[in-house]
Image (tube, grey):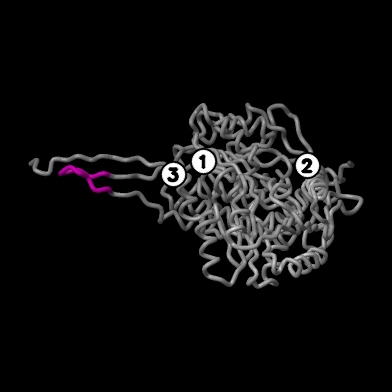
Amino acid sequence: MSATKSLKEYQMYIDGEFVDSSSNETSQVINPATTEVISQVPKGTIADARLAIDAAARAQKEWAKIPAIERAKHVRAISKGIRENAEQLARVISEEMGKTLALAEVEVNFTADYMDYTAEWARRYEGEIIQSDRPNENILLFKQPIGVVAGILPWNFPFFLIARKAAPALITGNTIVLKPSAESPNNALEFARIVQKAGLPKGVINFVTGSGSVIGKELASNPDVGLVSLTGSYHAGAEVMRAAADNITKVSLELGGKAPAIVMADADLDLAVKSIAASRVINSGQVCNCAERVYVQEDIAEEFYEKMAEAMKQTKFGNPLIHSDIDMGPLINKGSLEAVEKHVEDAIASGAKLLTGGKKAGDAGYYFEPTVIINATNEMRIMREEIFGPVLPIATFKDLDEAISLANDCEYGLTSSIFTQNIDAAMRACNELKFGETYINRENFEAIQGFHAGWRKSGIGGADGKHGLEEYLQTHVVYLQYNQNKK
C-alpha cells in the first residue's frame, strides 16, 4: 500500500482542544476502494481516555445546570455546522469507508436532522408526580442526567452514530466521550471541528481515537462513566459488558443482526425483490438491520429466484469518489472481504447453490460481487452468522407456521420483515416474530421517532424517539412530607 500525496493528519479532541496522543504514536486509515493510505490519526492511550473522562466529568456539573432549551441551542448550532459542510463531510465518509457518495450525503443530512429532532425534546421530557398513600405527602419523580456517557462507534454509519449517541446525551444534561472506529475515524474528527466552531463548552463532547482493546475497555471500565453506549458486533458488546460489570455501569448495546425476510405467495413480488435487493447492496451489505436471509414460499420460489438474481446482476459497483452512478462500493477491509468469501464457500460446500456472483471483483480495492445463493438451510453458517456483505442466501417454506419457526431460529433479534397482502399473516408476524422491529411490505430502515432496539444477542436498550432519549436519564424519587395544619 502506498500513501497518497495529500495524507491527512488528525488530532484527538479533548476538553475543547485538538491534541496528539500522549504516546505520540499514530495509526493509518485506508481507503478500501483503492487500498491507499489516506490519513493518520493518534493512537490513543489509557491516559488519553482518562483525560477525556475527567474533562467530561468537570464539564457535566455546569452543563446539567443549563436549562435544557439552552442545551438544545448548542445542539442546533452543531446541526447547522453539519449542513454547511455537508458536501465535504460526505466525501470524507465515502473515502474512508467506501460508502457511495449519494449514501454518504444522505447520512450527513440525516445526522443533522437527528440533531434537530433531538433538540425538540428539550421541553418535552418529563418527570412525574405519583400519588402517595399518606396524607400531606407528595411523591416526585425527577428525570436526571446520568453524568458522563461513553459512546463507542461503528465504522459502517460512523457519522450518524455520533448524533445518535451524543444528541440525546447532551439534551438530557450528560457529557460524552466518543471513541470512533479505527477503520473510519476521520469523519468523527471533522465533527469535532464543527463542535469547536459551534462554541460548545469545553469537555462536553470529547473524541479519543485508538483501539477498542485500549480506549474502549477504559471507557467501559472507568468508574466515572455512568453509561456505555456501543454499536458494534456481539463480541464487542460482550467485552463491554464484562468491562462494565465491576462498576455495575449501565450499558446500551446495539449489536449484530441476522434479519429474516419472509416472502408469502400472495406478496407483491416486485416490491419484495426491490426491497430485499436494496437491503443487500446498500452500504455493500454492511448494515446490521437489513435483510440477511430470505424465506420464500415454495409456490413462488422459482419466480422469486429469477427476479432476485436479475436484480443483483444489475447492481453497479465501483470507486465511490470516481463513479456516481453506482449502487455500492467496496467492503471495509481485507478481513471483511475474506470473511464474506468464506461464508459463500462454506454454503456451497454444505449443499447450497450459487445463482449469481460469489467472488471477489476487480484487481484493486475490497469489492465483492452481488451474490444470490439458493437451497440454503438453517443449519448452514450463512443462515446463522452475520454476513455483512452483498450476499443473499434463500431458503423455502411450506406455510406461515414453518416460516415463523425458521425466522425465529436464530441467536439474534434485531429486525425482521414480511411481504404479504394478507392481514392475518401480517398480524401473526407482528405477534410471533421475536425481533425488536418488523417491517411489513417495505425496506428495512427505521425512523428517528421510532425505537431501534434488539432482542437476544442483538443487544440491550435502544435508540431513537422518546424511549431512546430515556436511555440517558435516571430517576430520582423524592418523598415530600409536609404539615398542612402548621400555623
**Sooner in the amino-acid sequence: mark 2 or mark 1:** 2
Give the crowd class for mark 1: few <14, some 14-19, many >=20 residues within 10 Å: many
In the rendered structure, find residue 29 and report the number of the disc placed on it.
Answer: 2
Residue appearing at x 86%, y 45% in the figure = 4
Q: Amino acid at mark 1?
A: Thr
Magenta part, dominant SS: loop
Distance from Cα at disc 1 to Cα at disc 3? 12 Å
Residue 408's spot in the image, x, y percent? 59, 51
Q: Secondary structure at mark 3?
A: strand
The mark closer to the camera, 1 or 3, is 3
In the rendered structure, find residue 74 and report the number of the disc placed on it.
Answer: none
Residue 208's spot in the image, x, y percent? 64, 37
The mark closer to the camera, 2 or 3, is 3
Q: Secondary structure at mark 1?
A: strand
Q: Nearer the viewer, residue 390 or 407?
A: 407
Q: Nearer the viewer, residue 250 or 5?
A: 250
Q: Is residue 471 depicted above or below 215 in this figure?
A: below
**Sooner in the amino-acid sequence: mark 1 or mark 3:** 1
Q: Is residue 28 depicted above or below 314 in this figure?
A: above
- Does residue 16 belong to the magenta stretch? no
